[in-house]
Image: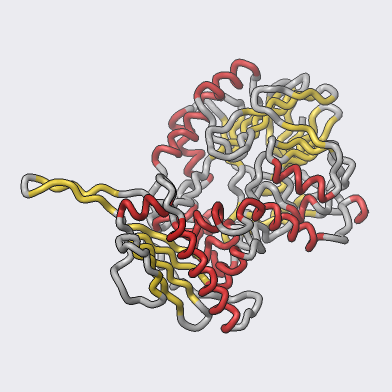
Amino acid sequence: MRVTLIGHATLYVEAGDASFLVDPVLRDPFEGGAVSSWPERSVDLAALPSPDFVVISHRHPDHFDIESLAILPRDATVLLPRDPLIAHALEKLGFRKMQPLDPGRPLSFFETQIFPTRSEEPVREVGLVFADSGTAIFDQVDTAVSRETAQQVRARFKLAAHFARYASQNFDYFESRAAEFPWQEHARNLETAAMLGAGLVVPGSAGFRYCGEHAWLNRFLFPVSRPAFLADLGRVSPDQRAEAMDPGDVVEMSDGEARIVRGASPFVRCLGGSDDELRFDPTSPVPALHDPNPEGRREAELREGVIRIARALAQWARADVTPLSVPWRYRQAGAVYGLTVRLPEGALQFSLDFGAAEVPLRESASGPEPTVTHQIAASGLLDWAERRRDFFSVRGWSRRFSTERRIVGDASGVEVLKLELPDLLMHWLLRESEGADEAARRRVDLEIARCAGAPTAAARR
């Protein structure tokens, strides 16, 4: 068995008589232009072998990349979780052979078996064991692995290699602007690697960085580096061999043993990159939020669109009095929701006071101090609301925090309790606004339309 790291989570697996292209992301940047592969790489699409199977682990855009799928030959069989959005995109792209991946239910192709594993994350995703007559590897991808799953995999397979979840990306930073080390998640990742007991552990599925004007985020979002993960794993499981891989490196396995051959791929080349580029430093400066307006929308168009969105949000919030709904929870708390939308020049400010009987929308900075706050760039908000972008590609232009709290006690003692409330704008756009139920599909359709006419990798040869 041979496994080539193409970059980030993209692997090319050759097992027995079958070949598998896993989570193909073949161009940079990706995720709406927000991120690019790290270390940097060059992929020769003309030299990329046509896979027998394409495997998609889950729908997040750094794994499920429409632009990359659009250039692949359509005669490949696609293995995918039971996710209707992924299935819709594949059908629209012209893939006709699809096979669902169900955790715990193995699939056999020639002499190769794929064993999908369960994830404890709230996403339809799978980890992937590839096994042939001589060896097995586990691609954990982004899955959180329970002790029971780890024990099941270890009992069933003697793993030669494990591409481990390691980076614990600090995406909570987008929620609260806090940047703490992920103590518990790091412990869980180390425990999973130690419990599986693979002969070789490779830090995997986190080979990207934010780029362009979002590059400042790299100091806040990647608290665990590859060297740090390897060093900590050495303390937990000193008898395990663990090494980092760069794009273009190949793992060769035979008789249950794995070795890394550096730069051996004929179709991927590593262009370099320093570990310091992703060095965690939450004391770094945070630039002021602004609107780059990348498509050059007119100021009047941005203002009109933002006001329309704010008024529609307020109309829904007033009308929904269903017990336990998000607006109902805001009313129970008497919360004040503040929305600041940054324009290329200036800003628009709104607030919804749920402590008042009519929940008035104030279109100014006046009124009570907000307890739940969302700031966002106007062009990003409009693209998101119009389903032209998903939140993954907009979140770099969005900042949110909450001071909502409940006070209990008296002179003998006081306790201040954090009160969790979902962000009102996010909840409405993702779940309640017009077209929300079809938003992901509409965005995928737009991406596919933009890719129309792109030659496949086979046509490039």
Picture colour scheme: secondary structure
In the image, what residue occupies the spot 61% across and 26% down? 199
Query: In this image, 304 relative to 7: left or right?
Result: left
Tell me residue 196's x, y (percent).
56, 24
Foreground residue, 98 or 223? 98
In the image, what residue occupies the spot 60% across and 37% down? 202
Query: In this image, 461 relative to 283: left or right?
Result: right
In the image, what residue occupies the spot 59% across and 76% down? 293
Tell me residue 297's x, y (percent).
63, 79
Quarter of the figure with residue 29: bottom right
Quarter of the figure with residue 44: bottom right
Tell me residue 344's x, y (percent).
53, 80
Q: Residue furthest top?
A: 155
Residue 110 seen in the figure: yes
Foreground residue, 23 or 154? 23
Residue 248 seen in the figure: no
Q: Residue furthest left?
A: 412
Q: Is residue 300 above or below residue 312?
A: below
In the image, what residue occupies the spot 41% across and 57% down? 281
* Screen quadrant of the N terminus: top right
Tell me residue 330's x, y (percent).
36, 54
